[in-house]
Image (cartoon, helix red, strand yellow):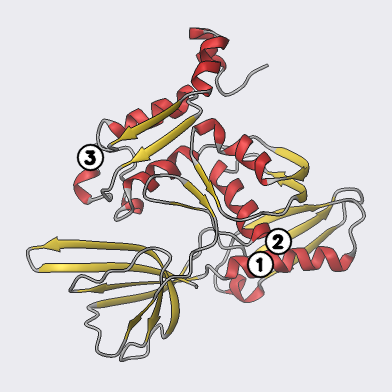
Amino acid sequence: MEHQFLRNEMLWGRSAQQRLAASHVILFGLGGVGSYTAECLARSGIGELTLVDQDTVGVSNLNRQLESLHSTLGQPKASAVAARLLDNEALGADYQVATVEDILRDHVAPYGIETVRGAELPPVPGFSVDAGSSEWQVVYEFCRYYGGIAPRFDRLGRLVLAPWEEGRRLVLGADAAVTSFRLREQRYGVLSEVLVRDRTTEEVQRVADEDFLRRGGRCRRVLTMPGKSSYQAMRYSGAYQLARAREELRQAELELPEAFAAWPGELVELNLAKGTGRGLWRVRESVCGLTAAGTYTRLTLGEP
């Protein structure tokens, strides 16, 4: 029977593959050599992989580093590499009852990603994995839409399954020297409709965010419920997932011509002079840099 590491076993044998699966490798540096090393280790079947790099992806990295793309500029390299290792196609599967242990075993552990857990996630009856989904998409949907926890990577490349810690609250008021501000709606990955299917009767209920659909949202997922689920339960499950997805619709990006110490997960209250983006936001990414013009800080903010 074919499996992910079959060709590896043909080369060095099953016992050697089992030794690799029981190994833990710590990789320091994810540049032109380290990023490719990380991918080779994951593809070889290393059981646990810890990624260490304090740098972020920059423009000068685009010519040689595996994790360096225009879409990852400014991200911590450890996080970008870890996300890449999970961006593999998942095998289609139907779980009678899926637990977080099942999801981590089948969709995270094969790539050697270390996991930090800080929340109890409920078991999900009738959880389905569509063929063609990425491993990251499976993990994200299970944690976010069923457990209310947005999975993320820390600076060591570890997968964190825990709520954001409520630390200090920062304020950017009318006197803040903001040089640029952009408020935009996320379109990719935000659900616009959910099809809820009863496993036994094959009845399907469609629950949609009509407003988001009119504005161009085009992301749909199929949710399989246990047999003989009630109409109300099916509608509620679909609406719950849409509500979770809608929390990630808005995103703000701003830049300051100075150093502004803000860590991912911290809350920022915006009270800018023109009133744009006023309210409470959570820091998703924070990049501080130095150019010929001086120091700058670039923040990416999401819903709190």
Q: Which residue is rendered at x = 22% and y = 40% of the image? A: 63
Look at the numbered disc 2 and give the secondary structure of its residue: strand
* Residue ID at (34%, 33%): 27
How crowded pointer 3 is (Cα within 10 Å; few <14, some 14-19, many 20+) is rated as few
- Give the spatial CA distance, label 1 vs label 2: 7 Å
Pointer 1: what residue?
A: 242
Please state which of residues 81 and 263 is positioned toward the viewer in this rendering: 263
In the picture, the disc for residue 63 is 3
Give the quadrant of residue 293: bottom left
Tell me where residue 152 appears, x and y as whole percent: 48, 53
Q: CA distance from mark 1 to mark 3?
A: 39 Å
Residue holding disc 2: 194
The amino acid marked with disc number 1 is Leu
Amino acid type at circle 3 is Asn
Tell me: 187 left or right of 99: left
Of 36 and 258, the residue lying toward us: 258
